[in-house]
Image: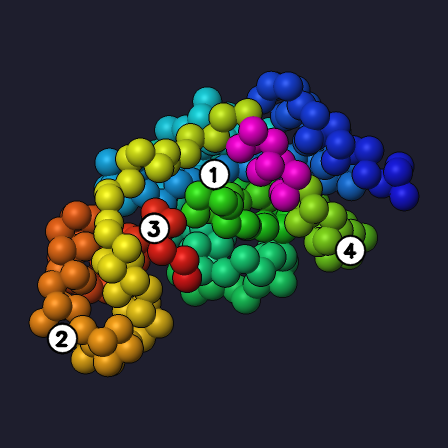
Amino acid sequence: MSHLLYPFEQILNAGSVAELGASINCMVHSLGFSSFHYGAHAPIKPNGERARFIFDGTEQKHGGVISSYPESWFERYQSQNYIEIDPLVRHCSRSILPVVWHQQKKTDDRNISRMFDEAHEHGLVSGATFSVIGKSGELAIFSITTQSQDEADQRNIAAQLGQGYMLLAHIHETVTRLGLPHIQSKDFPALTKREKECLTWVSSGKTSWEISRILGLSENTIVFHISNAGKKLGANTRSQTVARALALGIIAP
């Protein structure tokens, strides 16, 4: 069992991003893959504004991204703004189930087809993509790829899904330790206990009237607390207020 854990221990014990990248690269090759890409995204900036999702590595190359993808692909990805249409990014923003590339339905969207054709030209032919939501609500995405579409390689991709998830978990833990930007609690808007309580009930689908019955307060008082929380969070609607509170970790889902 120890020989299986050792590569992950190397990743956990990495003392720098460069050392971590080298350990990931070694592990990825031992699993039969040729390259990898890890990117982490915090949904909310410290000032409370929603952050733009950046997964191509061009604007965070020295921040939350570790990758062995060719630099030419980064440049192409950014110049064509592929992040706006990338189905892998879209899937991972909605689900933490893995994506096996060759098992996806063929698309009729010419732009997406062109994106994948160009990825193939850069050696990103087959692979799998994983995602996980971290302690501060950040979304981490990890892809492992091969340069061929051979049946043996595709079978290996399916066989290594469990290892891929384990690898991502250990990578993200280490990146967090090494200094993944976090939203510090001092940057959170200060909501009162009652405001948090009201937003928690709103997040579970309760109306102001229902919350007033639960808490034994007037409906107007409930509306006041929710409205006041929205002002503190810079939100314009009730749903936006709840979404921002959840993203910041002020209330639990």
- Residue 174 part of the magenta segment: yes
**Residue 93 shown left or right of residue 192 in the figure:** right
Q: Which residue is mark 3?
A: 250
Q: Which residue is pictured at 63% across the width and 63% down the height?
A: 103
Q: Residue at x 47, y 63 (%)?
A: 107
Q: Give me the C-alpha separation between circle 3 and circle 4.
A: 39 Å
Q: Which residues are magenta?
A: 168-177
In front: mark 1 or mark 2? 2
Q: Residue 159 colored magenta?
A: no
Percent coordinates x, y for residue 35 in the rendering: 65, 35
Q: Nearer the viewer, residue 7 or 65?
A: 7
Which sits earlier in the primary sequence, circle 2 or circle 3?
2
Quadrant location of the C terminus? bottom left
Question: How far apart are the alpha carbons under marks 1 and 3?
Answer: 21 Å
Measure the C-alpha gap from mark 4 to mark 1: 25 Å
Check disc 4 and report the residue beneath it.
Answer: 159
First along the sequence among labels 1 and 3: 1
Instruction: Give, as a three-letter code, the residue at label 1.
Output: Ala
Callout 1: SS:
strand
Q: How is the image coloured?
A: rainbow
Location of residue 20 (image quadrant) = top right
Quadrant of the snapshot with the N terminus: top right
Mark sitting earlier along the chain (1/2): 1
Label 1 vs label 3, nearer the camera:
3
Q: Secondary structure at mark 2?
A: loop
**Sequence-wise, which precedes: disc 4 or disc 2?**
4
Q: Position of residue 66 (x, y in %)?
A: 55, 29
First-in-chain label (3 vs 4): 4
How many residues crowd mark 2 within 10 Å: few (<14), some (14–19), many (20+)? Answer: some
Which of the numbered marks, if any, corresponds to residue 218? 2
In the image, residue 26 above or below residue 166: above
User: What amino acid is found at the position of numbered circle 4 in the picture?
Assistant: Ala
